[in-house]
Amino acid sequence: MTSVTEEPRLRSAIVKLAFSLFAVAMSSQAVSPLLLYYTHDLKLSGTILTAFFAIYALGLVPALLLGGAHSDRIGRKAVVYPSVVLVLCAVLALESAAAFGEAALIVARLLQGLTAGACFTVGAVWLRELAGPTHAKRAAMIASGVMAFGFASGPLTTGILVQWAPWPKILPMLVPAVLLAIALILLRSVPETVTERRYGKIRVGVPRESVAGFFAYLLPIALLTYTPAMLALTIFPLQIAETGVGMIYALAGLSMFFVQGTAAYAAIYARRWGPKACGWLSGFLCAIGCLCGYFAVQPDGWPWLIPASLLIGFSGGLAMTGGLMVADLVAPPDRRGALVSMFYVVVYFGFMVPTIFSLIWGKQTLEEGSTVMIHAIVAFILGLVLLGPGRRVVQRAESAAVAEG
């Protein structure tokens, strides 16, 4: 495949696809402060707030499982373009929540998960294939970086608009709607990378050749990507609000900006350090970030939210980029989409964790610092797994790649 550095047309295509991934990522998280606003406006419980994110995750699962595998057969563009159209429809449906309330929020979030999941999975693979094998690490950095920046700017923008702008139920989601419309225009000229249509059954799941890499590295590092970020998105704002701190919508947006902004920045270092270092560093930094978060939810401890968000975000950025690099390293070329899909299934399982905690142990768990401490302990254990078996499986895969190349 022609190198990006040798072909300006492909560079332009990568920029257009990267912008589209940014727009989809921004729209998926821009709604977060708005959901917090609706929770207070409709007098809903904290469990319902976390359920809005769990519903999004439930929508993601079939899209993640089928989207990547289906794109292996019919092409990347054939999956991504119609998915972006439906993402825009989901954003417009969120606007209707001002009139239809909680039911519209549930339907819109489910549709958003179904469509965004396919965009994230297939878009990342598409970007990597446009970049070519010699620029695979750079493509992983770009994909995780632009998505993280979209996740960061979305809640910050809408958090400010919800807190201080007029029409807080309508105006905030107009920004991502405009960006998605621009993305649809740009995507039309991005070339397809799957030039041979494949027939037969859609092969879902972890390829046989990738089982060791998945369980030793991809599974644990995927759990470190968004599970801790959900603390900053739901549990931290809810608990800090209980201590009497005001401007909760802006604070929630600022927290996610720090989380996802540092995740985008971490993608640069992840490419330099490589997946072996990214794994264990992600786990240990996440554990320290959760400890800071424990102090943040104590009375008068809200300033600790800043270091907690920065550490959790940097950890998540290392995890996402490291996972994409390893998925590319251990996947067979004709099953790359399927393996990345399985990686993303575990990544977005993190959106469901607070709701699971609440349903099993009661909604009071969302108001206790013990939840944060449990996350810290689990992150430390995952870091140990990635330091041992994770490093070894990456070492073997890298040695095999060198021997073949």
Image (cartoon, rainbow, N blue to C red):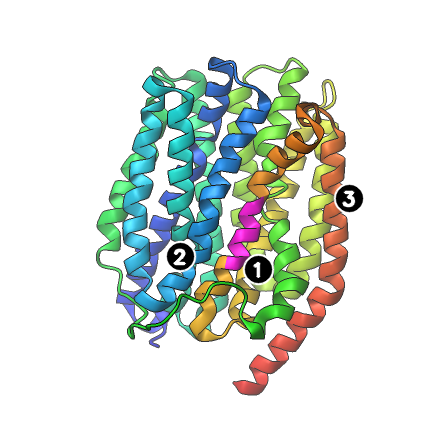
**Which of the two discs, 3 and 2, sits closer to the camera?**
2
Measuring 38% from the left and 67% from the top, which residue is drawn there?
A: 72
Please give left or right for residue 134 compared with residue 252 in the image: left
Please give left or right for residue 297 compared with residue 4 in the image: right
Residue named by callout 1: 323
Q: Are marks 3 and 2 in contact (CB under 8 Å)?
A: no
Q: Amino acid at mark 1?
A: Gly
Q: Are marks 1 and 3 in contact (CB under 8 Å)?
A: no
Q: Is residue 164 or residue 384 the one in the foreground?
A: 384
Q: Is residue 266 visible?
A: no
Q: Choose the circle earlier in sequence order: 1 or 2.
A: 2
In which quadrant of the rendered view does residue 356 lie? top right
Q: Amino acid at mark 3?
A: Ile
Please give left or right for residue 76 compared with residue 402 in the image: left
Q: What is the crowding at mark 1: few (fewer than 14 residues within 10 Å), some, or many (at least 20)? A: many
Where does residue 138 sit, x and y in percent of width and height? 47, 64
Quadrant where the image shows the N terminus: bottom left
Residue named by callout 2: 67
